[in-house]
Amino acid sequence: MRSLLIVLSVGILLMASSVFLSAEPTVSDVQQALIALTSSHAEEIMSAFSLGFTQGRLQVASTLHLINRLIGYEGEQTDKEGIVITVAHTLQDALPVAMLVEKAEEGMARSVPLTVILNGAKGQPPILGLTQREYLLSATRDTLYSKGIFRTSPEAKATTQSLSLVRFDTLVSEIADSLADYVESGGSPLEGHLLYQQVSGRLTDLAGLKVPIVQPEDAQLVLERVTPADLTTVVLKIFE
Amino acid sequence: MRVDSLDQALSETLHQEVQEEAYCIDRLEERVVAEIEGRIPRRGLVDFFRRMLAPTRGVRIGQLATVGLTAVVFLTLGVLLAGKITSPHQAVLTPVTASVISGQNQVLFVMPAPGANSVSVVGNFNGWEATPLADENSDGIWTANIPLPDGRYEYAFVVDGRWWGQDPLADGYVHSFGEYNSVRYVGQAGEGA
């Protein structure tokens, strides 16, 4: 009986350790990886990332994946830090970051130099880096604000439309991404009606899915209030 | 009778008696063990473990095997259990994974690449990590079915290490880092699930 108990105890210990080893990555894992990537800025970046985890704007697993990929990627240390700092800064500015994380991952998968992933490249058509995309997100958010489209807040007035954080973030992210697609395809920012078509097509397609990514009423709201000239103003921000 | 001859006589007598009863000790241990085993009631798994763990004169291979088997069983249970455990935020934080589990849309990716050694698809649905396509009947048509939730996806094929971003089956194309990405909308109205 004693032998049996010993075997069972060892078994339970092994099972517990295997559960531990197989578990999902934690915030602590992200922190350790960040310290390995950048010991000097780790604390302030982690503070922003923690905010992102809490808000649901950032995922632990994808963040850890990004950092580990950056650690093993060839490039300047300042560019590696620049990428995570840009993500952190965007979070601190209360903006969605999924597009930035995805673009950084795609760039590394394509073996694009880190400096291009971060800062883009001039040319015709230009390549937009994370820095330009951050401008686009910010300018898009500000435009929606100026049109009375807000995130839910107690101060919202009757003339404004308040959306949940997820719905507002989705709008900002999809509009900014479709504008980036337009620019990277060589489109001129001065042709506002084409910019408008681009955004309209994206929002309408996403609203038309069986499980809509953008709510049809949100798409309609944006397309009613935002004008081609507004979109030109947004895009010109990245060329300033 | 002298003492010396007495000792010899005693020795011969004992030797003769031992020889006469020798059959009694022949394979005595084996017979005793067989007898005992026959009398011990079998108690399933507990009995199995007890017998395997009982010390024997030889190398304790039985014990080692049992411990090893137990470790494998418990480790497997642990891994399976870990797969069931998810944090409360996981469903929110990883919507793609959640939908994969519920298995909504089986999205078919097709890439004609005769003579290719490897074909994979990378996209924003797999973190731009390669998901391999297969050419099961060696006709040069590589395919993969990937479960995806409704949404808009950018992707490209990678054929023998070279990116190919213009899928004829795509809903559209965009430029990204100076190259093409294919775009597909999954879950469009009128589209089969």
Image (cartoon, coloured by chain):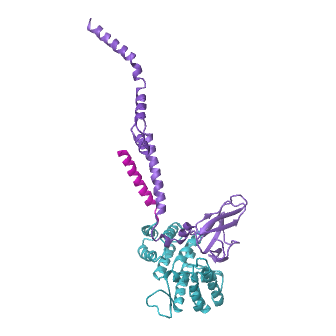
Q: How many marks?
A: 0
Residue A77 seen in the current view = no
Query: Which chain is displayed in purple in the rendered image?
Result: B
Q: Position of residue A150 (x, y in %)?
A: 50, 88
Position of residue B76 measured from the top left corner of the image (x, y, whole percent) = 48, 54
* Residue at the limit of the structure toward the bottom, as seen here: A159
First to last magenta residue range: A1-24
Residue A113 position, x and y percent, is: 58, 72
- Position of B45 with respect to A2 (left or right) is right
Give above or below for B141 relative to B76: below
Frontmost residue, A132 versus A217:
A217
Asked if A63 appears above or below A151 in the picture, the reply is: above
Is B17 a magenta residue? no
Examine the image and state in which quarter residue A125 appears. bottom right
The chain painted cyan is A
Rendering quarter of residue B185: bottom right
